[in-house]
């Protein structure tokens, strides 16, 4: 049972306290008002307006095409539906890399226009300047290491990252750098469980995993995947809690049947 369920608002400080108290942190993505309101009401700790919206909402094959304004549109819809969870908005590809001034401006735009509580960006030492500069504006930053989807064309595949010592060492180093720079939390995606546990134990900030095993401080999944709305995406780490794709298909099939057979609307369903 959560000691934090009755809490009116989750903050970055609550999350650090949760880590210290050994309470696991729950995090899911959302991109719209209705689902954000439902998962906030269910008691989720963090809602990530992920740039996975590029795949899930817009049907792109990668996260690269989504724009800053599109992320802000999704984040605005989410924040309208949330009263308790911490809302973190992904900084999209091209809005922070290689130019810390651009990173600062993008993050300010997200906070000002979307009402998000924090931003997330991908990468280690390459983006530390951007992290530090965003923090100068008082904006909390979540890091993201391991399989960072904005670098998919560099990686070439969605396979597990940091299996080799050299990449694992770099990841450990990057995690430390991000903590020292002032990140309040870190996402680790699709890396060996042992490595993720080592990183989580070596940091004081919470480490949230996706495909990174159970030795970290919390878990995140893409909402549409865990609800079984997406069918083609079947990584080992994904646990499906519903099969909404089949349920929706059946419901729509019944509706089509009722319309065609003139069963809908009936006497009681009209004025
Ligand atoms: O965009 C996203 O959904 C993410 C999660 C996979 C962590 O970054």
Image: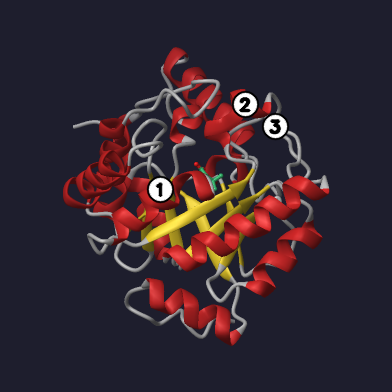
Residue designated by label 3: 158
Q: Residue at x 62, y 82 (%)?
A: 22
Q: Can residue 140 be seen at all in this image of the molecule?
A: yes
Q: Can residue 45 be seen at all in this image of the molecule?
A: no
Can you give x and y, in whole percent of width and height, for residue 140 in the image?
34, 62
Q: Secondary structure at mark 3?
A: loop
Q: Earlier in the sequence, mark 1 or mark 3?
A: 1
Please tell me whether mark 2 or mark 3 is closer to you in this view: 2
Q: Residue at x 18, y 32 (%)?
A: 271
Which one is in front, 204 or 243? 204
Residue designated by label 1: 35
Residue designated by label 2: 154
Can you give x and y, in whole percent of width and height, for residue 128 in the image?
44, 52
Q: Residues within 10 Å of mark 2 (few under 14, many from 20)?
A: few
Please tell me whether mark 1 or mark 3 is closer to you in this view: 3
Please tell me whether mark 1 or mark 2 is closer to you in this view: 2
Q: Earlier in the sequence, mark 1 or mark 2?
A: 1
The answer to whether 14 is drawn above or below residue 26 in the figure is below
Can you give x and y, in whole percent of width and height, for residue 148 in the image?
58, 40
The answer to whether 158 is drawn above or below residue 220 in the figure is above
């Amino acid at each position: 049972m959560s000691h934090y369920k009755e809490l009116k608002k989750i903050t970055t400080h609550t999350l650090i306290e949760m880590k210290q108290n050994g309470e696991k942190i729950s995090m899911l993505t959302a991109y719209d008002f209705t689902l954000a309101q439902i998962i906030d009401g269910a008691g989720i700790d963090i809602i990530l307006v992920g740039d996975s919206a590029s795949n899930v909402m817009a049907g792109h094959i990668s996260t690269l095409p989504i724009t800053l304004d599109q992320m802000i549109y999704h984040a605005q819809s989410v924040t309208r539906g949330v009263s308790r969870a911490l809302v973190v908005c992904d900084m999209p590809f091209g809005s922070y890399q290689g130019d810390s001034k651009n990173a600062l401006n993008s993050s300010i735009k997200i906070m000002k226009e979307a009402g998000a509580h924090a931003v997330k960006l991908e990468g280690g030492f390459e983006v530390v300047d951007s992290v530090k500069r965003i923090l100068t504006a008082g904006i909390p930053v979540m890091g993201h290491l391991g399989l960072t989807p904005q670098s998919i064309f560099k990686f070439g595949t969605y396979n597990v990252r940091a299996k080799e010592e050299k990449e694992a060492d770099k990841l450990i180093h990057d995690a430390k750098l991000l903590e020292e720079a002032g990140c309040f939390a870190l996402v680790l995606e699709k890396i060996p469980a042992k490595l993720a546990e080592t990183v989580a134990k070596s940091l004081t900030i919470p480490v949230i995993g996706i495909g990174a095993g159970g030795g970290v401080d919390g878990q995140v999944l893409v909402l549409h995947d865990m609800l079984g709305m997406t069918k083609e995406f079947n990584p080992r780490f994904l646990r499906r809690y519903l099969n909404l794709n089949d349920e929706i298909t059946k419901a729509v099939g019944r509706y089509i049947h009722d319309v065609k057979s003139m069963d809908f609307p009936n006497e009681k369903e009209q004025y």
